[in-house]
Structures are given as C-alpha cells and as structure tokens.
Image (spheres, grey):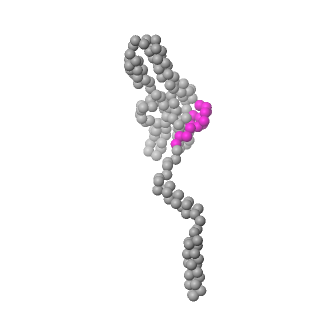
C-alpha cells in the first residue's frame, strides 16, 4: 500500500512541475506499474490424503489458487492433532513486505503470539432459508396470540361432549 502511495505521489509531483506533458501519459505509466505490484497473501494450502487433511501455511500471490504455486512455506497446521508450527521470523519478514494473512491464519498467528491484535471473524453462519424463517415466525405468533372468546366456547363444548360420553359409559 505504501508503494502505491509513493507511485501516485511521485507522478502527481512530476505532472505538477511539468504541465506541458499530457496527463494520459502519466496515467498509462502509473497503470503499468500498478499491474506489476504483486498482492501477497499468507494463507492455508490443503495437502494430505482424503479425510486426512493437513494444511501448509504459505505465502503466495493473492490472484493464484490456494493450492497452486506459492513463494514460500511458512509453517503447517494439522487439524486432527491441532498441531501448529510457524516460522516466526519469516512470517514477520513477509508481513513487513506487505503480505496480508487470511482471517484464519491471522487468528492462528494471534494464538501463537507471532502477531499482536484481536482475532478476526473468519466465518459467519449460513443464513436460514426463507421457508424456515416463516415457519418459525408462525409458531412464535401462535404462541403469543391470546385465545379469542369464540375459541374458548368451542373448547368448552368439546369438553362437555367428552364428559357426557364418559358418563354414559
């Protein structure tokens, strides 16, 4: 991010002091330099057999797939044994170079004490479907609604009829 700011600032200064040049030239040069900036991401990459997942902590270009090409392995995580191993020095190095950890990796690094800060919400529960919400609302409304006088009379009539039947027997 700092690099981006410096590029923009430098071309703004050049433009101000050299008004004779066309602004499109500066925009084109800036766009070419921005394309060459690599956004780095520290994230988990799944390895291991079927039903025996293990994850590597890797630093890679954010545009690549998580299981694709990476720059460096920074540690690993085994969810079955809850074992987490991180190369603290290398992680700090890559973060200083502008790499951003994913939410899950950020939480792991906070737990391990590699970085300081609060945890990030890594996932949110799925939203309920509309039908389920409507059904829940209907049951809540039925429980909250008071019984009307007509319904009370009908219930009393049903009780009287059942009492008569039991007396006859």
Q: Position of residue 50 (x, y in %)?
A: 44, 45
30 inside magenta stretch: no
| Number of residue marks | 0
Vertical position of residue 108 compared to residue 32: above or below: below
Task: State whether residue 165 appears in this view.
Answer: yes
Residue nearer the viewer, 166 or 27: 27
Task: State whether residue 112 appears in this view.
Answer: no
Majority secondary structure of the magenta segment?
Answer: loop
Q: Residue at x 45, y 38 (%)?
A: 47
Q: Which residues are magenta?
A: 107-123
Residue nearer the viewer, 85 or 34: 34
Q: Residue at x 38, y 19 (%)?
A: 24
Q: Position of residue 142 (x, y in %)?
A: 55, 63
The quadrant of the picture occupied by the C terminus is bottom right
Q: Position of residue 7 (x, y in %)?
A: 47, 19
Q: Report which quarter residue 158 is drawn in.
A: bottom right
Q: Position of residue 152 (x, y in %)?
A: 58, 73
Residue nearer the viewer, 12 or 129: 12
Residue nearer the viewer, 54 or 18: 18
Q: Residue at x 53, y 40 (%)?
A: 122
């Amino acid at each position: 991010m700092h690099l981006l700011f410096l590029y923009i600032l430098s071309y703004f200064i050049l433009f101000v002091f050299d008004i004779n040049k066309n602004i499109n030239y500066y925009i084109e040069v800036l766009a070419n330099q921005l394309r060459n900036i690599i956004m780095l991401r520290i994230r988990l990459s799944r390895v291991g057999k079927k039903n025996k997942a293990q994850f590597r902590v890797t630093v890679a270009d954010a545009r690549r797939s998580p299981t694709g090409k990476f720059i460096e392995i920074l540690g690993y995580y085994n969810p079955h044994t809850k074992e987490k191993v991180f190369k603290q020095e290398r992680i700090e190095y890559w973060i200083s170079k502008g790499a951003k950890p994913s939410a899950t990796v950020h939480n792991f690094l906070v737990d391990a004490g590699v970085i300081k800060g609060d945890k990030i919400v890594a996932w949110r529960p799925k939203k309920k479907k509309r039908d389920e919400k409507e059904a829940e609302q209907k049951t809540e409304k039925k429980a909250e609604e008071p019984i009307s006088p007509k319904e009370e009379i009908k219930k009393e009539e049903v009780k009287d009829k059942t009492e008569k039947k039991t007396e006859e027997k």
